[in-house]
């Protein structure tokens, strides 16, 4: 990067700060870039005065949970270390609450997005106002994007962001399939807002499903697992078969 000093020049002994935006590598980079600086002082005549190249001291402070993260071009990848999903109701046609718990390896800034995928087979139409709660509360914006066909829900992190290595649970209600339905294979990905043109991607990973039984359904806690309820025993009898009398009818189900 070559800079040209503007009119007025630079004063001796006075610090000057110049800032520029670059895009980090797609893969993690543990070693800071070695940055050096040199210069040529314009004499206004034929020959100029060179300033020898010297290495610049790198800020070694931690930043956003990254050791030496303030050093130039050091970067790490954000991952979801904790990820689990379950549901509340395993029967067809009913409303079921899907609960997803996540924890990221690094802080996730406000306006970052988290995308849940694989929630296919529901009867919940596309909308941007799906009822949603979180624990702790208010960690996601009130507007989000649900697609029934794609089975995706895009969440936007609210002001305050998400802390590193802290579990957050988000819950929302979908309508189960009208027919028997196998559990959904849910995955999660995201993008951490950098405040610039490019965010840092969080690679898509599978979310671990709760495989516990629920309401007599094997694996009923798994997301969007749905079965049809059947009446296994059907029997009807009466207690008095004579005319004009009271008659007790008994139904066994």
Image (cartoon, rainbow, N blue to C red):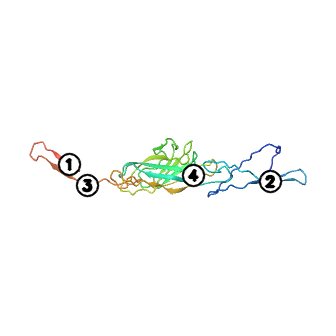
| Disc 2/disc 3 C-alpha distance (Å) | 86 Å
Q: Position of residue 32 (x, y in %)?
A: 68, 55
Is residue 212 visible in this depiction of the protein? Answer: yes
Q: Position of residue 56 (x, y in %)?
A: 75, 51
Q: Secondary structure at mark 3?
A: loop
Q: Earlier in the sequence, mark 4 or mark 1?
A: 4
Q: Nearer the viewer, mark 4 or mark 2?
A: 2
Q: Residue at x 17, y 46 (%)?
A: 249
Q: Which residue is under mark 4?
A: 191
Q: Which residue is under mark 2?
A: 38
Is residue 119 visible in this depiction of the protein? Answer: no
In this rendering, position of residue 17 left or right of residue 182:
right
Q: Secondary structure at mark 1?
A: strand
Q: What is the crowding at mark 3: few (fewer than 14 residues within 10 Å), some, or many (at least 20)?
A: few
Q: Quadrant of the N terminus?
A: bottom right
Q: Which residue is under mark 1?
A: 251
């Amino acid at each position: 990067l070559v800079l040209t000093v503007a009119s007025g020049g630079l004063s001796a002994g006075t610090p000057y700060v110049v800032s520029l935006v670059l895009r980090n590598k797609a893969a993690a980079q543990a070693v800071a870039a070695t940055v050096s600086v040199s210069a040529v002082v314009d004499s206004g005549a034929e020959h100029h005065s060179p300033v020898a190249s010297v290495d610049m001291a790198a800020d070694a402070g931690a930043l956003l949970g990254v050791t030496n993260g303030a050093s130039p071009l050091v970067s790490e990848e954000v991952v979801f270390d904790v990820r689990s999903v379950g549901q509340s109701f395993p029967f067809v046609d009913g409303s079921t609450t899907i609960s997803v718990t996540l924890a990221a390896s690094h802080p996730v800034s406000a306006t970052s997005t988290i995308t849940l995928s694989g929630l296919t087979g529901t009867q919940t139409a596309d909308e941007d106002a799906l009822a949603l709660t979180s624990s702790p509360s208010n960690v996601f914006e009130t507007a989000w994007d649900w697609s029934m066909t794609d089975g995706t829900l895009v969440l936007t992190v609210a002001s305050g962001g998400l802390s590193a290595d802290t579990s957050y649970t988000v819950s929302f209600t979908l309508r189960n399939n009208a027919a028997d339905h196998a559990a959904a294979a849910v995955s999660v990905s995201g993008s951490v807002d950098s405040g610039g043109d490019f965010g840092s991607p969080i690679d898509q990973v599978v979310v671990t499903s709760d495989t516990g039984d629920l309401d007599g359904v094997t694996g009923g806690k798994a997301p969007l697992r749905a079965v049809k309820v059947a009446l296994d025993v059907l029997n009807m009898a009466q207690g008095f078969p004579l005319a004009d009398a009271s008659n007790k009818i008994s139904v066994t189900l």
